Amino acid sequence: MTLARAVRIHAFGGPEVMKLETVELSAPTSGEVLLKQSAIGFNYIDVYQRSGIYPLPLPTGLGHEAAGTVAAVGADVDDFKVGDRVVYMAAGLGAYTDWRIVPASKLIKIPNGISEADAAALLFKGITAQYLLKKTHPVQDGEMIIVHAAAGGVGQILARWGKALGAFVVGTAGSPEKCAIARAAGCDIAIDYSKPDWVETLLAATGGRKARVVYDSVGKDTFLHSLDLTQPFGLVVSFGAASGPAPAFTVDLLNKKGCLFVTRPSVFPHIADPATFRAMAADLFAAMDAGWAKLDIDARFTLDQIVDAHRAAEARATKGAILIVP
């Protein structure tokens, strides 16, 4: 039996609802692996779930991704052995812990040259960028794309990777400082969307050119503007709601804006099949190795500091990835 320290919530609310508890883990059964975790990724969906914006059955753990070392394997596990460095996501909530039992089908071996910290910090964000750039809309050389919140975790990866695919990348961000981060991440142009005339400023900067695809993780504050910034027959990808849900609209509006397409994808259906998930991860690791998928770890918190980690995220007090270290 293994004793794990795990973050749990018994009610929705502010960061203070998270409690560190001791959980007893039995030995891994068939198809399972016991991990000693060394790095836990933070994603803003963790805030949505903790606060109740995305309700969950209670009580529950939190966290979607982590990396570590295989400590024990159950029966019928042939792909992994004790000592393997691995990373996972979408293995059910509960990544905020130091020890965890995970289905082997959810694990990916970490290649040499990639640290467990980088793997944990980038997997969820990087896989999201991978499907957005390769599946939701396969970005082509010479296309113009717009990335909202380009200074954020997914935004920076989209900008760098999109640039590597040959796109002309226009980023938006909420302050001059964040626009500088977006430019450093590969954006050809970065526009401050906190300004009232930002749409006109963006179009002036591109010479009136509009995007083949707009990646919108902001939602309420940007979505209708995204329609105005998309070229005829182009695509608006709404994949987040940092400012609140995107406003309701009638499908006739898409015709009026230029016969546009709109989609609302999610990462989880894309990785439901283990073989597909591992192929996507291999593509991500190759992009990381090439420097196309890159994100600085700006802040590290221990499990004992998990309340501080969430407060820092909600205050937008960090510039890169947040990493939780057991």
Image: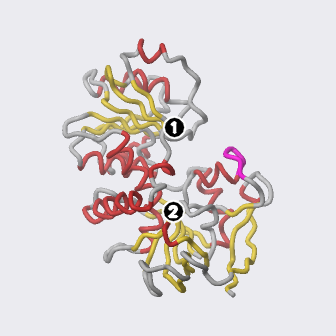
Residue 27 place in picture, x, y as percent: 64, 84
Q: In percent of the image, x 55 and y 81: which residue is there?
A: 36
Image quadrant containing the N terminus: bottom right
Q: Does residue 249 appear to the left or right of 18 in the view shown?
A: left
Calculate the distance from the C-alpha at mark 1 to the C-alpha at mark 2.
Answer: 23 Å
Labels 1, 2: front one: 2
Q: Is residue 150 above or below residue 29?
A: above
Residue name at image x 41 percent, y 30 percent: 236
Q: Is residue 295 above or below residue 195?
A: below
Q: Main secondary structure of the magenta part?
A: loop
Residue topped by disc 1: 218
Q: Which residues are magenta?
A: 51-56
In front of the other: 214 or 252: 252
Asked if marks 1 and 2 touch (Cβ < 8 Å), the reply is no
Magenta highlight on residue 81: no
Residue at x-position 33% and y-position 38%:
137
Q: Earlier in the sequence, mark 1 or mark 2?
A: 2
The picture places residue 211, in percent across and down from the top left corner, at 31, 29
Relative to 143, say whether 35 is above or below: below
